[in-house]
Amino acid sequence: MAQRRTPFGDRARYWFDSTLARGAAALVGWMALLSLAVVVPASAVMVWTDPDAPPSLAERLAEVWRLTGETLRLGGATGTPLRAMMSVLLALVTLLYVSTLVGLITTALTERITSLRRGRSTVLEQGHAVVLGWSEQVFTVVSELVAANVNQRGAAVVVLADRDKTVMEESLGTKVGSFGGTRLICRSGPTTDPAVLPLTSPATAGVVLVLPPDEPHADAEVVKTLLALRAALAGAEPRPPVVAAVRDDRYRLAACLAAGPDGVVLESDTVTARLIVQAARRPGISLVHRELLDFAGDEFYLISEPALTGRPFGEVLLSYSTTSVVGLIRGGTPLLNPPPTTPVAPDDLLVVITGDDDTARLDDCAESVEKAAVASRPPTPTPAERILLLGWNRRAPLVVDQLHRRARPGSAVDVVAEPGEATIREISEAEADSGNGENGRNGGNGGNGLSLALHHGDITRPETLRRLDVHSYDSVIVLGRDPAPGQPPDDPDNRTLVTLLLLRQLEEATGRELPVVTELIDDRNRALAPIGPGADVIISGKLIGLLMSQISQNRHLAAVFEELFSAEGAGVRLRPATDYLLPGSTTSFATVVAAARRHGECAIGYRGHADASTRPHYGVRINPPKRERRRWTAEDEVVVIGTD
């Protein structure tokens, strides 16, 4: 068979590529030939078209040589061959020296730029925020810090993680968006190395936040990072406040010891479990938490108000028109929703919800209270509840414990999980830890009447959900699996989305809405979740990131949030508006505050039923002006700080 003839162009290109592969000498030769091929003909044209050109051919060739030499900086002297050769030699030596100098300068600049791009230079900032570690929480933390610094000039946020600096900057720029006046500085290196931490100048920082990485041994990594930070800050006074988070309560003591007396360590799994249970018992509460924790609206502040010293706390509730008072800080201890007769001591700080630290201005609103609109009937009692828990993970025992703490007699929790996810032993241990008596596969009745039962099944299968009669439950909680080693951290969300899709199909088939509380890992999956508007979605990493950002601005708020999200203390509650006002009445929010005071609660906002499906707040209004009047319906809800 005849060989196929290779085109001349392909052969020429191959030959050219082969010569280039021989190294720098071949490249220099080709550059010299290419330059001569252009310069010599162009110089000849210039000489032959010059009216003043020499008449003889030798003189014209000499002129071409001179122009070529001047163009290529190769001398260009004419005369004897020795003189021309010396001219070329001197030009080559000069060219070699200049090119070497330029090469050295270029190499040094390239190495310096590469070093800067790798994030290995020391940050020289004062009062900046340092974020150590990389996880899904970093985007929430940086975004909230940017929002908190919107009114500050020269603010900076420094992120140190064992990742490429350029990748970190691109990821943060994509997910966070505009940084406003805040400068974002990324540095690359392990956060557990005391020799690397000085790159962030932690000694001059305003606050240091330590994030748990998305890894199985994240808590041990946090403790090691805190120890490295303590070593890096050895001898530095004063030390910046430290805010960290761990997942397992077994690591919290070690993390607190490593963080030091001024450090704050959050327990993310416990906080997440508490919020899941609160949302299961009162749909919509997660929206209230989000409004309270982000910097976009009103948030918590601690203020001093000497003019209110000696006045009872009940009167203080109506002393501000655009600020909601929720408690006191006395001797460093938070007193949320104290009895109305509690007097304000001279050294007390007020715990308030307001737009900014300078927007709390005294403005008595007692005259706006309309007693005729206040309801006189007792609050609605909390009935026994039936909870369906779909899925099992490391937070599930904590969820069961939180459900037990406030369970009414006759309450029941049914757990549905695959045999490999939850065993009878795990269910029994969770029931025992929560204080129940007899345990077993079908559950037991403890002292408070909460029963716990395990049903095996795949929650991503339609037949599993059809057997459950999901509409008979007061609330459905969907938990994702724990990420398996080697899998992406948000992989459990895939199964959760499938389960939500099946629950949505059951809603459409029956025409009845299910009160579903969903736990997701990646906030981006919220938009994919087939759930109704305003549904409760708990993004564990985002919530902890919001809490860390709030505490980073004032570490004394840590005790306030600990009380607020605890199972026994005064927390955020959603109550029917009819517990406080007559249905259909048109009155001010000051009237609601006065009515809640009669129940021993602090009213801080409401959720309007008419806007419950409207973005972006879904009817939630925190800290409305107390003189603002509106019509209150039986379906509206009031947000209060109180106990059950």
Image (tube, rainbow, N blue to C red):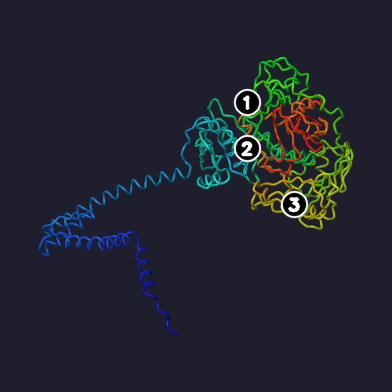
Residue type beneath disc 2: Val
Camera-side residue of 635 and 184: 635
Quarter the N terminus occupies: bottom left
Decide if residue 201 is in sight here: yes
Q: Is the residue 47 above or below the residue 330 in the image?
A: below
Q: Pointers 1 and 2 in contact (CB under 8 A)?
A: no
Q: Residue at x 51, y 37 (%)?
A: 183
Residue at left offset 43%, top offset 84%: 2
Task: Give the CA separation, mark 2 to mark 3.
Answer: 36 Å
Q: Which residue is mark 2?
A: 223
| Between discs 3 and 1, the one toward the N terminus | 1
Q: Please tell me the numbered disc located at residue 500.
A: 3
User: Is disc 3 in contact with disc 1, using a CB cutoff of under 8 Å?
Assistant: no
| Residue at point 64%, 43% (across, down) | 218
The residue indicated by pointer 1 is: 359
**Does any portion of residue 203 appear in the rendered image?**
no
Q: For the residue carrying disc 2, how many other residues have a C-alpha within 10 Å: few (<14), some (14-19), or many (20+)? A: many
Q: Position of residue 41 (x, y in %)?
A: 22, 63
Q: Mark 2 vs mark 3: which is more N-terminal?
A: 2
In this rendered view, identify the residue nearer to me: 607 or 639: 607
Q: Which one is in front in this view, the residue at disc 2 or the one at disc 3? A: 3
Quadrant housing residue 596:
top right
Amino acid type, residue under disc 3 in the picture: Leu
